[in-house]
Structure formats: structure tokens, C-alpha cells
Amino acid sequence: MLTYEVTATVRPDLCDEYERYMRERHIADLMSTGAFVAASFSRSAAGRYRIRYEARSREKLDSYLAQHAPRLRQHFTDTFPTGIELSREEWSVLESWT
């Protein structure tokens, strides 16, 4: 299992719109690609967010990055041309507990 993690720093005046967009559109769009089995959306402080997507395999994540990420990233940029800084990381899950 792999975790694809996106961290966002959002300008204060965009926080409400960003949260709504992520909940109502963007996360659902990523999940509908079939590349991910789970997602979570977290906030640590005002304007600081983390979105985690769980991919079952390297192949699924690579397929998402090649076939879907450019289109979804462009839609995000079109929606929020300024005011949001993003960073992306991939994590190999060594073990998990539920």
C-alpha cells in the first residue's frame, strides 16, 4: 500500500471555498479514478491542510499520475489560480493498524 499525500497552505480568505471544493468536488474526482481505496482530509490549523489518498499498489498510483493527475491538477489551478501552496509526497506504508 502507498499513501499519496498532499499538503496545502491556504490563504485565509480562501479557506471556506477550498474546504467546500475539496469535499464536494476534488476528492470525489480522485476517488472516482479507481486508483485509491481511501482518502482523508485533515486540518492542523487555520489554512493548513493534509489530504491522504491510499493506493493499493505502485501500478495504481502510477496510472493515476499518468492518466488523471494532469487534468485534475489543471482543474484545481483553474479554480484556485493563486493563494494556495501545495506539496506532494509518496509514502510506502510499512504496516498499518485499525
Image: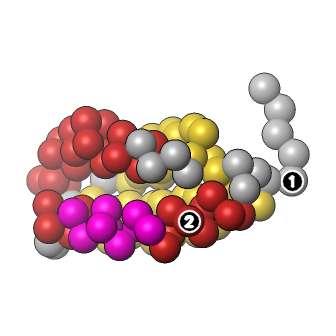
Mark 2 and mark 1 in contact? Answer it, CB < 8 Å: no
Location of mark 2 (residue): 63
Residue at 76% x, 51% y is: 1
Q: Please state the horizontal and vertical placement of residue 28, each as a whole percent of the image.
A: 36, 40
Q: What stretch is highlighted in magenta?
A: 67-75
Secondary element under disc 1, as helix, strand or loop, is loop
The residue where tag 1 is placed is 94
Residue under the point 72% across and 56% down: 57
Residue 69 among magenta residues: yes
Q: Which secondary structure lies at badge 2?
A: helix
Image x and y of residue 92, in percent:
77, 61
Q: Where is residue 3 in the image (x, y as percent from the top left)?
A: 65, 55
Kindly indicate the quadrant of the structure image that contains residue 75: bottom left
* In the rendered image, the vertical position of residue 98 relative to residue 16, given as above or below: above
Mark in front: 2 vs 1: 2
Q: How far, Cα to Cα, is label 2 from label 1?
A: 22 Å
Q: Residues within 10 Å of mark 2 (few under 14, many from 20)?
A: some
